[in-house]
Amino acid sequence: MPGVMPPSGPQSPVGAQRLATQTGVITADVPILIYHHVGAPYHNQYNVPLNDFEAQMDYLAQSGYAAVSVDQIAAALRGQGSLPRCPVAITFDDGYADVYHNALPVLRKHGFKATFYLVSSYINMSKQYMDWDQVRALVDEGMFIGSHSYNHSYITSTVGYTMTRQIAGSKAKLEANLGISVTTFSYPYGATNGFVMRVVSDTGYVSAVGAGYSFHQSSQRVYNLRRTAVYNDTKLPVFISRLPKRGPDGTGLCPLPPQVLYWRQLRWIEKVG
């Protein structure tokens, strides 16, 4: 089978075994993927075609990745928990209805749990966005809900009541309507600074995500964890290249036991032709 060589040599441990501590800082390589639209009926850079999304999730499942919450990553980085052997976090920003209709069945197929960062004032705003019943259905399926602010403003440009509404008001609205604790935050446009992060922490969030295009996570950044964006043109080879480079051949495959990994690679390549 071209492109797949039988594994040899030791495989590097990952997940909880990869948490490293140096001078009091805990680090781990955990990809946090960010999506906006999936299979929407129009073209823009944020709209990932459904077949591409399916291929990406199939690849993660076949390669042995386990989907975790952002809060779980933050807890592990604080030394308060562990991660599975091959962790990945799947996140969706803004609360678009196409994600509910198109991405959710794919996640369900693989048993993947994802974090949905919702703009609280957008819910029920139009058919483009999820309504409260759809969001409650996500909760019922065990998905994680986070805040993406009140109305998607640049929080670094707000002060006083306006900042409070973006951070605390959105949290309160989600919690009141869903009956859950909302403990993770996504900065609109990835924009944040030290003051905003302190407000997020003081408001009761235990984690927050920004941008950064990296899978290197650190206990120094639990309120600005890095995410890797997936775009309309992120085809599978590019997607794979943005995963942690693990394994003796430098691929992005999660290092399962060598023989299991080898046969899963064969089955996956046969499936996609």
Image: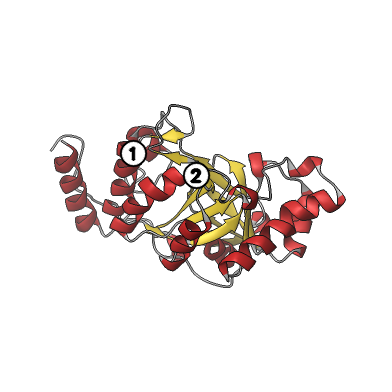
Image x and y of residue 43, in percent = 43, 26
The answer to whether residue 39 is above or below residue 195 is above
| Residue 145 in picture, x, y percent from top left | 54, 60
Image location of residue 122, percent across then percent down: 60, 47
Question: Tag 1: residue type?
Answer: Leu
Q: How much space separates mark 2 and mark 1, taking CA atoms?
A: 14 Å
Residue 234, percent from left and from top: 40, 32
Task: Name the side, left or right, on which 182 lies relative to 47.
Answer: right
Q: Which quadrant does the N terminus fall into?
A: top left
Looking at the picture, which amino acid does disc 2 mark? Tyr
Q: At x 53% / y 72%, what residue is drawn? A: 81
For numbered disc 2, what is the local secondary structure? loop
How packed is label 1: few (under 14 Cα within 10 Å), some, or many (20 or more)? some
Within 10 Å of disc 2 (Cα), the crowding (few <14, some 14-19, many 20+) is many
Q: Which of 241 and 106 is in front in this view?
A: 106
- Any part of residue 244 in sight: no
Residue at x-position 48% and y-position 53%: 30
- Camera-side residue: 206 or 183? 183
Residue 96, numbered circle:
2
Q: Look at the image and tell me in which quarter the C terminus lies.
A: top left
Q: Which mark is residue 121?
A: none
The answer to whether 249 is drawn above or below residue 41 in the figure is below
Residue 56 lies in quadrant: top left
Number of the front mark, 2 or 1: 2
Chain-order first, disc 2 or disc 1:
1
- Residue drawn at x 38%, y 37% is 39
Q: Nearer the viewer, residue 137 or 260?
A: 137
Task: Using the image, determine if residue 242 lies above or below residue 68.
Answer: above
Specify whether 11 is left or right of 217: left
Identify the secondary structure beneath mark 1. Answer: helix
Is 205 placed left or right of 259 in the picture? right
Give the residue at mark 1: 50
